[in-house]
Amino acid sequence: MKKLFTLLSLFVVIGMSANVFAQSSTGSAPYPGAMHNYSVNGGTNNGSSFTWDVLDASSSSVVGSIATISAVGSGAKTDATVNITWAATAVPGTEYIVVVEETDASGCKNSKGLPVIITQSAFDLIVVNGGNACYENSVEVTWSGGQAEGDVTYDHGTAEVTYTVKAEGVGATETWQFTPGVAFTQTDIVATTVTVKDETSNVVSESAGVYSLTGPQTVTITVVVDNNNIYNNGSAANAQDFTATLSLTNVAAGTGAVESDATNNSDNLSVSRPNTSQITTN
């Protein structure tokens, strides 16, 4: 296939389409890592075969380095519709052209081109804590009948903590996913339940605790935490206080776009009670 596309021809686009997601990665302005569908003739072969390529500004092919061309479903890479995945290392601001040459049954050929500019990813999942929390119930105080420090014990029970996760840079029909995990600054503290709720209802996790949602929205994560430590009169006044940190793993956009900022995938809050001292007397 002759690579006779000049910089001027980058801006001549006729009869070629790419899937577009508003305010997200698009076929003509893809995020690094994103995959998009490209087609001509409504994706119908009509007895023709098609040769797809991606060229840089010097008309050199970047297939295999910047772009990967793959078949759609059970189709072939020589069909009128293909998927192109843009490398996660693609540099925003760099221009390329997607070109296709159609060869009909008689051997007659025609070509079309679509200019593409790599765009800085706006896909981001932002975790924000819902505020510091107290325990849910009163302290369970137990006395064994002796006078030693360890004869009076305190069980603080459970606390409910909340966080929000806001998805940015995804299209209205684009999926995104994450796996939530909670860590604590004390041992013997466990998360007994994790509930993820979108704007209307609870979200059921898929395999391995992965939650999948659609479109730009904010979800709420509620975690019930059980402090299994038992404290006594020898414990510090703030012994029951701890920090709970929610972190997201398996973060992904449906297009495969890289996340713009992976540093805001976690946040923490404190669970505490008033730091009441031991009782003193004269």
Image (spheres, grey):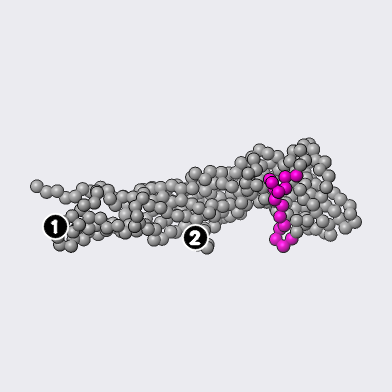
Query: Could you tell whether 18 is left or right of 169 in the image?
Result: right
SS at mark 1 in the image: loop
Most common secondary structure along the magenta stretch: loop
* Location of residue 118 (image quadrant): top right
Tell me the mark number nearer the camera, choosing from 2 and 1.
1
Q: Which residue is mark 2?
A: 209
In front: 190, or 38? 190
Q: Is residue 25 visible?
A: no
Question: Among all residues in the image, which is located at the extreme front?
Answer: 64
Mark carried by residue 112: none
SS at mark 2 in the image: helix
66 is within the stretch colored magenta: yes
Contact check, label 2 and label 1, Cβ < 8 Å: no
Mark carried by residue 147: 1
150 is within the stretch colored magenta: no
Tell me if mark 1 has few (under 14), some (14-19) or many (20+) residues whose alpha carbon lies within 10 angstroms of its own.
few
Residue visible at 80% across and 58% down in the picture: 45
Residue type indicated by callout 1: Gln
**Residue 263 sits above or below residue 215 on the image:** above
Start and end of the magenta stretch? 61-75
Q: Give the percent coordinates (x, y) of residue 93.
A: 66, 38
Question: Among all residues in the image, which is located at the extreme top?
Answer: 8
Tell me if mark 2 has few (under 14), some (14-19) or many (20+) residues whose alpha carbon lies within 10 angstroms of its own.
some
Residue visible at 52% across and 45% down in the picture: 262
* Mark earlier in primary sequence (2, 1): 1
Query: Could you tell whether 105 is left or right of 59 in the image?
Result: right
Residue type indicated by callout 2: Gly
Q: Is residue 250 visible?
A: yes
